[in-house]
């Protein structure tokens, strides 16, 4: 069994990302025209690679097979063994405080309650808790995703 769950960005994050890109390009242009060139170069060396990094690590899709969950971004895949999952549940967006990237390409970073977050839609959150690591992700069919994982976990428990 192989299932794929799409991950799309909510309208809020699309608008926020577009506004941030436009603002930072405008600021870069103003710095280039109004200040010394080295200031604009330093700005470009710091800001543009950060944008590229968050774009590349933002979640693209989630794949599930009989044994693992794969959180797939453009440059990285995180493998989560299904038999190591303690709890998988839907989560509400209440009190969602993230340290990291807030708004550009979603919410990427760590939450205050130590979840590793890669969220593109705050209304479709799924919490995956293992023994030592907790993930908070979003996918378009979050209820189906949780049901699929719980079914696979239960199938592994029954002989």
Image: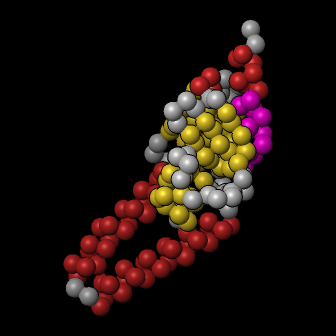
When the figure is inspected, residue 95 is found, relative to residue 41, above or below; the finding is: above
Q: Nearer the viewer, residue 11 or 83?
A: 83
How many numbered marks does the figure carry? Answer: 0
Colouring of the image: secondary structure
Is any part of residue 139 visible from this angle?
no
Magenta region includes residue 144: yes
Q: Position of residue 96 (x, y in %)?
A: 62, 58
Residue most extreme to the bottom: 34
Res. 12 image quadrant: bottom right
Magenta region includes residue 14: no
Res. 85 image quadrant: top right
Magenta-colored span: 139-150
When the figure is inspected, residue 132 is found, relative to residue 83, above or below; the finding is: below
Left or right, residue 142 beside residue 74: right
Q: Position of residue 152 (x, y in %)?
A: 72, 24
Residue at horizontal 71%, vertical 31%?
149
Residue at horizontal 28%, vertical 78%?
40
| Quarter of the rendering occupied by the C terminus | top right
């Amino acid at each position: 069994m192989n299932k794929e769950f799409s991950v799309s960005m909510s309208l809020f994050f699309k608008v926020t990302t577009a506004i941030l890109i436009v603002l930072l390009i405008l600021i870069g242009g103003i710095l280039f025209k109004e200040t010394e060139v080295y200031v604009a170069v330093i700005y470009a060396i710091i800001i543009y690679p950060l944008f590229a990094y968050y774009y590349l690590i933002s979640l693209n899709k989630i794949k599930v097979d009989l044994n693992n969950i794969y959180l797939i971004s453009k440059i990285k895949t995180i493998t989560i063994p299904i038999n190591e999952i303690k709890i998988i549940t839907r989560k509400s967006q209440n009190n969602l405080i993230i340290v990291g990237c807030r708004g550009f390409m979603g919410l990427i970073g760590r939450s205050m309650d130590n979840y590793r977050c890669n969220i593109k839609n705050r209304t479709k959150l799924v919490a995956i808790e293992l023994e030592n690591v907790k993930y908070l992700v979003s996918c378009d069919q979050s209820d189906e995703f949780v049901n699929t994982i719980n079914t696979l976990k239960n199938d592994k428990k029954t002989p």
